[in-house]
Image (cartoon, helix red, strand yellow):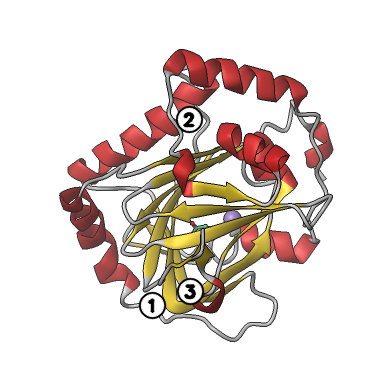
Amino acid sequence: MLPKLLKNNYCLLKTISPFKQLNNVKLFGITSFKNQNISKISNELNEKLQIKNSVHLLDSNDPEVFKTMEQFMIIKEDFINENEEKSLLDEIDPYMKRLRYEFDHWDDAIHGYRETERLNWNEQNSKILERVKKFAFESFAGTEKTNLLNHIHILDLHQDGYIKPHVDAVRFCGNTIAGICLLSDAVMKLTNEKDKNKYGLALLKRRGLYIMKDTIRYDYAHEVLKNTESIFKNQVVNKTRRISIICRNEPDLEAHPEKKD
Ligand code: OGA
Ligand code: MN
């Protein structure tokens, strides 16, 4: 379905949001990947490109899950500086502030949020997003070609808001999800879809970038914890209002025809 509203370069995400689709067609946990090969390739690429994951921001109750996170849940601390954060906020906030936070929809995967999508950005912010594209999509894929979705998702989570466990709809976005975090730290939990006792935690710090790839993106449900549960390595992480700017790529339906329906 096409977005209902187009206004100042924005279109309301609601109608096409991976969340909505996820809920509507119940895509939770339907995918499972043979990730041996992907894992090997990803490791080699990481080494070649010397991409350093901020592993001190990762934790898990299971050593195998931790290993998987080291390769597929990449965190880049201080990806943007304070000026860049301000520049992004200056562009986003006047629009976001006009929207109301949504709290009470029982079927929503997110509680206490407002969201939009943006296509066009000012020059400084375009440069920041270009860096995300290069770092998260081109470097990892080992190619200059990216099938990045043009619309960038902006999610504004209220201080009391949280994101329930979900897997982004496989029909609508590809193997890589990259998010810049603004305004607040938060804890993301990644739960193995096959064995829900196994999970990992990632401390998503303000101004950091995180990248969820391949098996972490497909075989783990991700959530952003509410304040009462927001603890990382025995430290309470106080989440205030938080905005994430999320880039996704197109699904590769040819490589994964099973995801067409
Ligand atoms: C999403 C999501 C995480 C974040 O919008 O699907 O999981 O960092 N967001 O806001
Ligand atoms: Mn998601």
Residue 137 marker: 2
Q: Amino acid at mark 2?
A: Phe
Q: Is residue 142 in view?
A: no
Judging depth in this view, the residue of 257 and 139 nearest the camera is 139
Residue lying furthest front in this view? 234
Residue 150 marker: none
Residue under the point 46% across and 47% down: 57
Determine the quadrant in which ligand 2 lies: bottom right
Query: Which image quadrant: the C terminus?
Result: top right
Residue under the point 57% across and 49% down: 59
Residue under the point 49% across and 76% down: 227
Q: Is the C-beta separation of discs 1 and 2 under 8 Å?
A: no
Q: Is residue 214 above or below residue 159?
A: above
Disc 2 residue crowd, few under 14, some 14–19, many 20+, Cα 10 Å: many
User: SS for tag 2?
Assistant: helix
Q: Is residue 69 above or below residue 220?
A: above
Q: Amino acid at mark 3?
A: Tyr
Q: Is residue 55 in view?
A: yes
User: SS for tag 3?
Assistant: strand
